Amino acid sequence: SSGINAEWPLRPGAKIIKDHVTMLSSIFMVLLGYRDNSTTRFDEHIEIKAVECLTDLVYKLTEKEFLPLFVSLMEWSQSSVDRATTFYHLTSVLSTKLQVERKRVMVRIVWVKTVIMRLDSKGFHYG
């Protein structure tokens, strides 16, 4: 036996993450709420790291799994200006990274189409 369990998801740990999205959401809300906590001095590095980690989590979720998390964060952000500022920071980073990823995917699609067109022009038949 190769030691690989065929039931595991393609991305190791993905099922574990998906099973604990609610708990992770609560943890991220605490971390993202650091700016809003009046008993501590705000440290931008904590928010930056929390946003980076949350962005990494988003890449592991399907749209169906991500949407409730996003709605929770949006509702959470409406209770104060500090939270709204943090939410804006988060959405700005997410949109930038997702646009970059979308562009990478589009470049790959264009490259594949170009290769197929070149093969077609040389008489290569596939399928």
Image (spheres, rainbow, N blue to C red):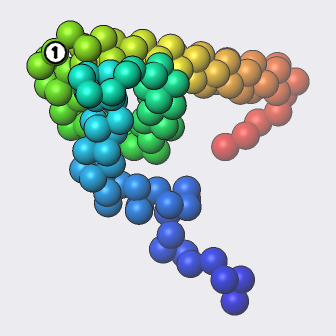
- Residue for point 41% across, 62% down: 16
Question: How many numbered markers are drawn?
Answer: 1
Between 33 and 5, the residue placed more toward the observer is 33
Q: Which quarter of the figure is the N terminus placed in?
A: bottom right
In this view, the residue farthest toward the right is 122
Between 109 and 75, the residue placed more toward the observer is 75
Q: Residue 67: image x %, image y %?
A: 25, 34
Residue 102 visible somewhere in the drawing: no
Q: Is residue 125 above or below residue 82?
A: below
Q: Residue 13: image x %, image y %?
A: 50, 60
Q: Amino acid at mark 1?
A: Ser
- Residue for point 14% across, 25% down: 75
Q: Which quarter of the figure is the C terminus placed in?
A: top right
Between 79 and 108, the residue placed more toward the observer is 79
Q: Residue 9: image x %, image y %?
A: 50, 63
Residue on which the image places disc 1: 80
Q: Is residue 26 left or right of residue 125?
A: left
- Residue for point 73% across, 21% down: 111
Q: Is residue 94 above or below residue 56?
A: above
Say which element carries label 1.
loop
Q: Is residue 37 left or right of residue 44?
A: left
Residue 11 visible somewhere in the drawing: yes
- Residue for point 12% across, 19% down: 79
Density class for disc 1 (Cα within 10 Å; few <14, some 14-19, many ≥20) is few
Q: Residue 10: image x %, image y %?
A: 55, 59
Q: Is residue 101 above or below residue 59?
A: above
Between 90 and 36, the residue placed more toward the observer is 36
Q: Is residue 73 left or right of residue 107?
A: left
- Quarter-of-image position of residue 37: top left
